[in-house]
Amino acid sequence: MQKEPIILSAFLILPFFSACGQKTDAEPAAEESKADAVKAENIKVVMDPVFHSTNALINGSDMKKLGFSFGDSVTLSFSNGLTLDDIPYHNGYYVRPNSPVAVACPGLDEINLAFNIGEGSWNVWNLQDGDTVTITLKEKGRYLNEQETFAQSHSDDIKDYPDAETFENFRALSGGEIAPGVIYRSATMTNSTMNRADTVDDLAEQYGIRTILDFSDTEESLAGFRAKDTWHSDYFDRLCDTGSVHVIGLGVNPASEEFHRDLSQALYRMIQGEGPYLFFCTEGKDRTGYAAAVIEALCGAGCDELLADYMKTCENYYGMTEETAPEQCRAAIETSFDPIMEIIFEVQENEDLRTVPFE
């Protein structure tokens, strides 16, 4: 099936915006024998309703009590007969795109079993309601190098950041020929889990945002956030009342037909509204980063500009720059930025990403 073009043609977007690791060595044999006894047995699995990945109903704290550590290798044995061997267990998605990983995200009550920005694992693994998984420790610390390289934590306290914009990863797009102050990106305005929604709401009003794309929510999840006592996004509410908020529920797989279709339609809906524009996902990193790269590329940005915007997110959240953390930055570029850009822009195997005319 031919993939739907990821974006509207450049002649539509450009004038509009211009105007406006290595694995660690195996542990000793004594450690391997100990690993045989470390397992979480018959854990119920459910489908993630947004991303169609697989959630095992056990949290990271319970996994730690059983003897698992981030950076371990695990085996996943499902009740439908499927077994996946040598899967990294991390507290983030520290694997290349389309690779399987078991992730215990901080603050969540489930272990996400997924392909990093790939197809929904629930359907790929032919799982059904009532299925279970047994997670067994295969090798202690096999992926510890990747864990230590990528596991950058960030504070959810605005006092730990120089200003509100850095805290919110809030900034105007500037690549190519995009005019200043036309289109912005940020973290969520709706989910208060990371203490950012209220501040983004204030910034959106301060910068005069008139049209919003909400990549992270469905209508159902948005209604849930708005019903909570922690909801204080009054400016968001006012824009909703005027029909200026578009709830997209964008997926996380940039290679999928659905992603291409939804992002194309979302950008078309956005430019029908009044600027300035703002788009966001939960942390303003992944789905927001994909959209930012596409828009900037259509407006004439080259690879260096796209990379600079990507690395600005690393700096805002983690204080990570090529000067202060060269190894981590290099790993992030090689494992995340480069392959994701190759997927989004369908770069051929023999092409150099740095010389591709993205527009």
Image (cartoon, grey):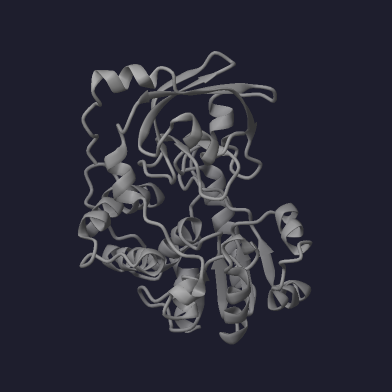
Q: Is residue 239 left or right of residue 358?
A: right
The quadrant where residue 357 appears:
bottom left
* Foreground pick, 54 / 153: 153
Residue 262 location in percent, x, y? 59, 53
* Foreground pick, 230 / 83: 230
Q: Is residue 269 left or right of residue 9?
A: right
Residue shown at the point (33%, 64%) measured from the top left: 311
* Foreground pick, 238 / 341: 238
Residue 358 location in percent, x, y? 34, 60
Residue 160 location in percent, x, y? 44, 73
* Foreground pick, 167 / 157: 157
Q: Is residue 183 left or right of residue 162?
A: right
Q: Is residue 239 left or right of residue 7?
A: right
Query: Could one spot residue 114 in this view of the protein?
Result: no
For the image shown, how many numbered marks are present on the structure? 0
Residue shown at the point (27%, 66%) measured from the top left: 321
| Residue closest to the far top | 81
Residue shown at the point (76%, 76%) measured from the top left: 242
Residue shown at the point (53%, 66%) measured from the top left: 187
Residue 132 location in percent, x, y? 61, 22
Q: Is residue 351 above or below residue 267?
A: above
Query: Could one spot residue 341 in this view of the protein?
Result: yes
Q: Look at the image and tell me in which quarter the C terminus lies.
A: bottom left
